[in-house]
Amino acid sequence: MTQQGSLTAEYMEGPAALRAADAFGLVYAEAFAEAPHHETEEEAAAARLRFPAQTRRPAFRAALARTPDGEPAGMAYGWMLQPDAVWWDELTEPVPDAVRREDGRRTFGLIELAVRGPWRGRGVARRLHTALLEGITAERVLLKVHQEAGAAAAAYRSWGYRKIGESRPPAAEAGADAYLRDVMLLDLPTVAGAARG
């Protein structure tokens, strides 16, 4: 658990995250209702319904930021990409096979990272990211970010991510707003080097 000021960012594995599902759902619904996402209550409810199954994914890990009185301030979660992961298939331009190869241990997919409005600009997202990835054995982290989410993309770049392409949500997710997302990759050379050493 990391602490700064009055907020804590707690690392969780699947069972603990599932017990805190309401907190994750609250952060998700509030953060993604705003621009540029404009998710509806129905979309937030669908995300809540998906969450229990997501917590059972291979190597699922999460982080939850709370105030001293327990109010959720931000959340992050993801899991290791498996050999049959479709993320690479969603790219608008293909990448080399050496880049897209997955074995269940190579790439951590950062699915969501969000901070509620009152706690933005205080380093909460960075603390969540750090707590989420602490001790991870992946070689790299992959994420997708809405192209109009400029502040989020700028934060990811400042943390070492680089854009490697663009993707479009699959038809099942796209609805009327089939916006493009930037696909960003963060290499974790220290961890990868230690694993090889």
Image (tube, rainbow, N blue to C red):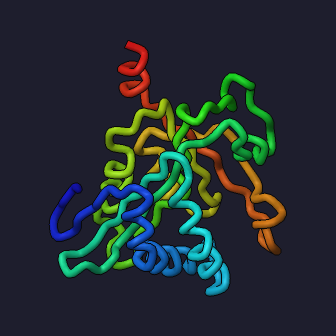
In the image, residue 9 above or below residue 116? above
- Residue 93: percent from left, percent from top: 80, 39
- Residue 173: percent from left, percent from top: 76, 66
For residue 154, side relative to residue 193 (left or right): right
**Residue at figure coordinates x 76%, y 55% from the top left:** 168
- Residue 26: percent from left, percent from top: 45, 80
Quadrant where the N terminus sits is: bottom left
- Front residue of 161 and 96: 96
In the image, residue 140 above or below residue 16? above
**Residue at figure coordinates x 38%, y 51% from the top left:** 132
- Residue 42: percent from left, percent from top: 66, 85
Q: Return the residue found at the far top.
A: 197
Q: To which quarter of the image does residue 24 belong?
A: bottom left
- Front residue of 175 and 19: 19
For residue 54, side relative to residue 160 (left or right): right
Q: Return the residue found at the far bottom.
A: 41
Quadrant where the C terminus sits is: top left
Q: To which quarter of the image does residue 91 belong?
A: top right
For the image, the number of numbered tags is 0
**Residue at figure coordinates x 60%, y 56% from the top left:** 145
For residue 78, side relative to residue 88 (left or right): left
For residue 41, side relative to residue 87 (left or right): left
Q: Return the residue found at the far left.
A: 5
